[in-house]
């Protein structure tokens, strides 16, 4: 289930990854290595700045936003001059209103699905009111649900754009040559992949040209399973290259550390290890080789020790809808069942 370890650079054969002298700081030559930047603090400050104290009004009254909070995680990563974004966020804020006849009312707004799976115009905006639901106050609430929700989506669209264009400045490093620098600068915008870009072709037709490209529809899924072994034993089965080769009966290359790349099933699956806590958690940027270039899904595997067994929960988001079943079958049949069969960890329980 791991991916994306290209052939290693060969010393003395002109491989550009060895040419560090082209950058005086010797930093991430040719943007080859996986780099990651925490986008959450910047996103939290940006969203609070554009929404805190925002006022709008209509025929039915006036509303002000306050107590803006953004919770969750967000990262921006660079791999070979491609920018990849992962974020799971929840926005909450308070609203205070005045009816057309001057009566006060208030409530809450929540946006629970700030994720790379959705475009800003697809975000759910839920509105509640704490005040008594008089006809006049209910009209203000409806104003928040319609006019206020549209304003929130507009502000989040601006955040979405700034995340790609402002926050990532400097993540793609220029080379010494002027032409390389110009090319890298363009890729800050042109090389961005946020799981759902209208310019990306559907994974089922890899030959689709830019003239016929269609939006990539995405989905997510969860797999739960149990193994008769310790979390340490199961974790090794997921990250140890020799064990993976043994139970998949296919070539695999795994650099088992944060930022390490991997390929599995003879390069049909590839990716990068985004985060790991030994024997407990594994987070991956994961792709099938038939997916549009630069498109990664987000995989999180949690291991929890039970009585004589280990409980595994896998969550995968950003999966092209046409390949959802294929990805699930790959995990269940070609990895988890084979781990049980080869190492004797079987329980026969899977959800």
Image (cartoon, rainbow, N blue to C red):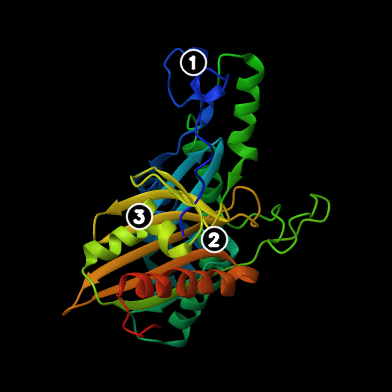
Q: Outermost residue, left direction?
A: 307
Q: What's the residue at 64%, 31% (across, down)?
A: 186
Whether tag 3 and tag 1 are in contact, CB under 8 A, the answer is no
Q: What's the residue at 61%, 38% (across, down)?
A: 189
Secondary structure, mark 2, is helix
- Numbered circle sitting on residue 277: none
Front residue of 43/308: it is 308
Among the two numbered marks 2 and 1 on one chain, the one whose residue lies closer to the N terminus? 1
Q: Which residue is mark 3?
A: 239
Number of numbered discs present? 3
Other-residue count near label 3 (Cα within 10 Å), few / some / many at <14 / 14–19 / ≥20: many
- Single out the mark in the foreground, 3 or 1: 3
Q: Which residue is mark 2?
A: 153
Spatial CA distance of label 2 from label 3 is 40 Å
Among the two numbered marks 3 and 1 on one chain, the one whose residue lies closer to the N terminus? 1
- Single out the mark in the foreground, 2 or 1: 1
Residue 205, how many percent across, how many down? 75, 61
Secondary structure, mark 1, is loop
Image quarter for residue 278? bottom left
């Amino acid at each position: 289930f791991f991916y994306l370890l290209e052939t290693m650079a060969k010393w003395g054969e002109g491989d550009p990854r060895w040419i560090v002298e082209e950058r005086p700081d010797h930093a991430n030559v040719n943007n080859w290595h996986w780099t990651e930047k925490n986008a959450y603090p910047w996103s939290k400050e940006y969203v609070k700045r554009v929404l805190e104290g925002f006022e709008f009004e209509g025929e039915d009254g006036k509303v002000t936003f306050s107590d803006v909070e953004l919770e969750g995680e967000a990262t921006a990563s660079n791999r070979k001059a491609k920018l990849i974004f992962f974020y799971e966020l929840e926005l909450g804020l308070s609203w205070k209103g005045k009816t057309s006849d001057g009566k006060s009312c208030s409530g809450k707004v929540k946006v629970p699905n700030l994720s790379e799976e959705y475009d800003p115009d697809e975000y759910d905006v839920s509105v509640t009111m704490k005040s008594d639901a008089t006809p006049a106050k209910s009209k203000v609430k409806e104003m928040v649900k319609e006019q206020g929700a549209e304003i929130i989506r507009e502000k989040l669209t601006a955040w979405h754009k700034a995340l790609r264009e402002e926050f990532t400045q400097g993540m793609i490093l220029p080379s010494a040559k002027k032409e390389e620098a110009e090319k890298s600068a363009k890729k800050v915008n042109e090389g961005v992949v946020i799981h759902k870009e209208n310019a990306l072709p559907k994974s089922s037709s890899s030959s689709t040209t830019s003239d016929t490209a269609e939006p990539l529809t995405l989905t997510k899924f969860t797999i739960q399973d149990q193994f008769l072994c310790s979390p340490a034993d199961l974790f090794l089965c997921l990250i140890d290259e020799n064990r993976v080769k043994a139970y998949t009966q296919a070539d695999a290359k795994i650099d088992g550390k944060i930022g390490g790349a991997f390929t599995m099933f003879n390069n049909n699956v590839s990716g990068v290890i985004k985060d790991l806590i030994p024997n407990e958690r594994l987070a991956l940027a994961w792709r099938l080789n038939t997916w549009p270039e630069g498109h990664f899904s987000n995989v999180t595997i949690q291991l929890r020790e039970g009585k004589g067994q280990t409980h595994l929960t896998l969550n995968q988001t950003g999966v092209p809808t046409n390949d959802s079943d294929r990805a699930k079958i790959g995990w269940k049949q070609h990895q988890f069942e084979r781990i049980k069969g080869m190492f004797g960890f079987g329980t026969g329980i899977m959800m």
